[in-house]
């Protein structure tokens, strides 16, 4: 018997996460997560994201891919490592000055919900055919990923309606702090990877790739819920729902022209190979 992991080929999760456009959803989720003062303080005080943003992005991408497409053992081991890292971390509340744990359920839940909501919202806005019923299925399936991070799945929103209610309950606690403002600027205009040749880095800073990334970041901001855009002062072009949808669909169309071998990682390829063997 092939181990197809936490989900499998019949899941909504596998179908949605096969879409390369979800990288925009990942960026969108970071903008949302930064609006939680404690969550952002935890990142700022424990992470070297400004020194190694691309390395952190790669590590996060590998974790998500392992949780979705890895074997059961691989997903569980990734969760164990993540919980062990979080268990050692502490931060100081920027308002009260009290120390808190990074693995508090409220913080873990905020990160989880903003991430999965960003993934499914970006997929739908970009034109991925997902029905409302499948959206609810996706949220329910993603409770398995929440459990990897140490959450009780029963405390995690498992449908679109529950996510909407969750956001409504969290909005009074959200705001832009010094840390979140710095994260906003950094996420929108990050430095080029330091390992690149200096001449190549200079070309990226001034040329088309830099402008292309700014377009992606602007689209991710435009895809934020209206209440989140208002907290950021209305930032993000495009700012209208129509323009944001047109932009994300254009990016997805551009990605469709890229050969699949360039957007399929080894974890995904391994899952597809196991699934093929399971049905042969």
Image (tube, helix red, strand yellow):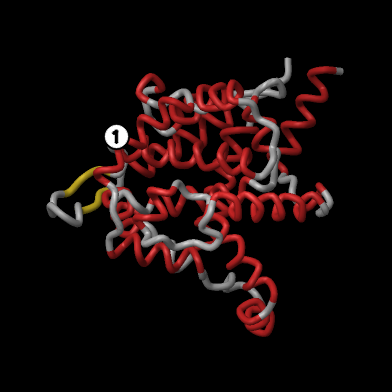
Left or right of 137, for residue 249: right
Residue 95 location (% of width, % of height): 16, 55
Camera-nearest residue between 263 and 226: 226
Quadrant in which residue 276 is drawn = top right
- Residue furthest top as drawn: 1
Name the quadrant of the N terminus. top right
User: x and y percent of residue 225 in the render?
Assistant: 45, 46
The structure residue drawn at horizontal position 29% and vertical position 34%, both measured from the top left corner, is: 169
For residue 72, say whether it is visible.
no
Quadrant of the rendering where the C terminus is positioned: top right
Residue 202 in which image quadrant: bottom right
**Residue lying at 59% horizontally and 21% vertically, measured from the top left:** 133
Q: In the structure shown, which secondary structural element does the residue marked by tag 1 occupy?
A: helix
Percent coordinates x, y for residue 66 in the rendering: 60, 37
Task: Tell me what residue is drawn at x 44 percent, y 63 percent.
Answer: 235
Q: Is residue 222 left or right of residue 96?
A: right
Residue closer to the observer: 125 or 13: 125
Of 13 and 252, the residue lying toward us = 252
Q: Is 89 above or below relative to 232?
A: above
Residue shown at 62%/43% (left/top)?
125
Q: How many marks?
A: 1
Q: Which residue is mark 1?
A: 169
Q: Position of residue 25 (x, y in %)?
A: 56, 47
Q: Residues within 10 Å of mark 1 (few under 14, many from 20)?
A: few
Q: Confirm whether residue 146 shows in the render.
A: yes
């Amino acid at each position: 018997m092939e181990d197809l992991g936490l989900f499998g080929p019949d899941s909504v999760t596998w179908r949605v996460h096969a879409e390369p456009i979800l990288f925009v959803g990942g960026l969108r989720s970071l903008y949302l997560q930064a609006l939680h003062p404690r969550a952002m303080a935890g990142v700022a005080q424990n992470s070297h994201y400004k020194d190694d943003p691309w390395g952190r992005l790669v590590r996060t991408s590998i974790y998500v891919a392992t949780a979705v497409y890895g074997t059961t053992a691989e997903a569980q081991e990734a969760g164990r490592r993540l919980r062990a890292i979080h268990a050692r971390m502490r931060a100081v509340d920027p308002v009260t000055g009290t120390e808190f744990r990074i693995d508090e359920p409220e913080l873990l839940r905020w990160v989880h919900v903003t991430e999965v909501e960003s993934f499914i919202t970006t997929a739908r806005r970009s034109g991925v055919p997902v029905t409302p019923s499948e959206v609810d299925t996706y949220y329910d399936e993603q409770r398995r990923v929440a459990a990897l991070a140490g959450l009780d799945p029963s405390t995690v929103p498992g449908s679109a309606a529950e996510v909407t209610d969750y956001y409504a309950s969290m909005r009074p606690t959200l705001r832009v702090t010094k840390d979140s403002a710095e994260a906003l600027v950094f996420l929108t205009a990050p430095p080029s990877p330091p390992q690149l040749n200096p001449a190549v880095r200079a070309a990226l800073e001034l040329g088309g790739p830099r402008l292309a990334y700014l377009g992606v970041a602007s689209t991710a901001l435009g895809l934020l819920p209206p209440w989140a855009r208002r907290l950021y002062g209305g930032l993000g072009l495009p700012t209208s729902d129509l323009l944001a949808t047109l932009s994300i669909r254009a990016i997805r169309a551009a990605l469709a022209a890229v050969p699949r071998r360039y957007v399929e990682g080894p974890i995904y390829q391994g899952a597809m190979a196991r699934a093929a063997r399971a049905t042969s």
